[in-house]
Image (cartoon, coloured by chain):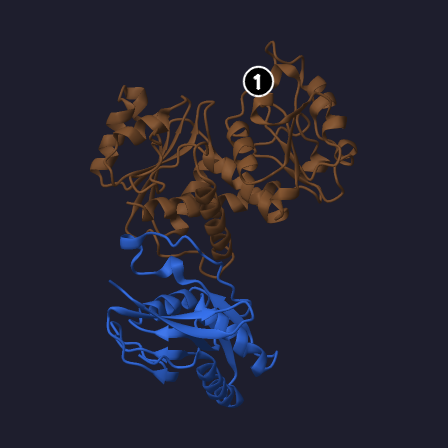
Amino acid sequence: MQLPDAEHLVATLADKIRELAAKERIALVGIHSGGAWLAERLHPLLGSEVPFGTLDISFYRDDFEQRGLHTQIKPSHIPFEVEGRHILLIDDVLYTGRTIRGAMNELFDYGRPAKITLAVLVDRGGREMPVEAQIAAAKLDLAPTQSLELLRDESGVFSFKLNEKK
Amino acid sequence: MTTNPQLNKNGELQHLLSIEGLSQDILRHILDTAESFAGVSEREVKKVPLLRGKTVCNLFFENSTRTRTTFEIAAKRLSADVVSLNVGSSSQSKGETILDTVNNLAAMHADMFVVRHSQSGAAHFIARHVAPHIHVINAGDGRHAHPTQGLLDIFTIRRYKPDMHNLRIAIVGDLLHSRVARSEIHALTTLGVPEVRVIAPKTLLPGNVERLGVQVYHDMNQGLKNADVVMMLRLQNERMNGALLSSAQEYFKCYGLTAEKLALAKPDAIVMHPGPMNRGVEIDSAVADGAQSVILPQVTYGIAVRMAVMSILAGNT
């Protein structure tokens, strides 16, 4: 299967987000790890007045009972008032929707946002929750046995990797 | 291969009984996770849903208000239901055995026991006898161990002095009766701290203390020189009038931390104390309340560290 060029999709996503930021006062929140990388890249393009934070949703996962606590947890960092803000939530790949549910639950423990918009690089289908992305740079149809992973090399260049589960 | 009673068959942490025998990976996992929990306590809503529906039992056969309170707060910030029992004052006095007490609480579907006992090995004993889904945390057993205190000390050091490979740490006071010092020295060395010093009179040092890889000083003025971290230990009042020490005044003169003595350490050295403090015995008030003191942050971090331990244990089945 031909995977899309990640850098090309980042440029598409950046255009769409710039359009939104021109119309509305937003705050950027990236979900660890891929979404945080993207938010880090996109943030400078939006101007320094746009607040920027990251979430690690490990404490809000719905599979804690089955899988325990992740071994690589990063602190969530939301250095602005969430109350009353329009939050642009950013993730790399939208799949079941469970991560986004966890992220929304965590955001509400910082305050009540006025609005949450979801932007992703790839919507790969396979939803298990009523969650949709308002902005998606690409849509792919992947089998449940496949997982799409965003990689970032030392120079910060993004690429995709397709993993097959046995 | 020796079996470590703290680990499950996958090598994951099932109980926390002692720092001894924990790999560098497990130590780091606890410390890194605590870093994330430190942020939770600063939020508007100081709570995460990880232990929702779980029941944590604080079983205190020996009283310790601070330890019990921080465990209670930690469990509540993880959304667990918490029951705190001062067992010494109830069942035990009526003649119930430890195991009967534990089994009764297990019958009430407790998921985790936090155990404090005056006898060494009490938490191990309970861990050996509980059902496999139950987790046990040692909150201090006799002279043996108090792992979450050791971990929160290490967490505090790492927070203020992130480059552990470049540290000179001085531990001052009653190492003989401390249940934290020995395992802590071991963990600090495991995490790469190159120089740990102990400063104490001969009567308050365990035999063969050099074997832990520490440098021994009996003179505080020498031992504190260029230290990055000064860890004061609590001097138990009940031992003061025995054969080990002449008097509290005498002890303070030789081993009490004053501003003049602290000036021998590095200018940015931090001062730690596990509490409760004996002001004017092991530490002068001016130092305890001074700019270099991190004694209250230690209490704050204790909650994050206990949240990390509880959630890691609860996730390992």
Shown colour of chain A? blue
In the foreground, B165 or A58: B165
Provide residue A122's location: percent of width, then percent of height.
37, 79
Which chain does the numbered disc 1 sit on? B
Q: Residue furthest top?
A: B243
- SS of the residue under disc 1: loop
Provide residue A79's location: percent of width, then percent of height.
55, 67
**At x 69% / y 27%, what residue is drawn?**
B280
Whether residue B101 is visible = yes
Question: Which chain is tinted brown?
Answer: B
Left or right of B112: which side holds B176? right
Q: Quadrant of residue B227?
A: top right
Identify which amino acid the numbered label 1 is placed on: Asn
In the foreground, B289 or B27: B27
Q: Quadrant of residue B213?
A: top right
Left or right of B201: which side holds A164? left
Q: Residues within 10 Å of mark 1 (few under 14, many from 20)?
A: few
Q: Is residue B115 above or below residue A161?
A: above
In the foreground, B108 or B262: B262
Judging by the rendered image, the residue that carries numbered circle 1 is: B208
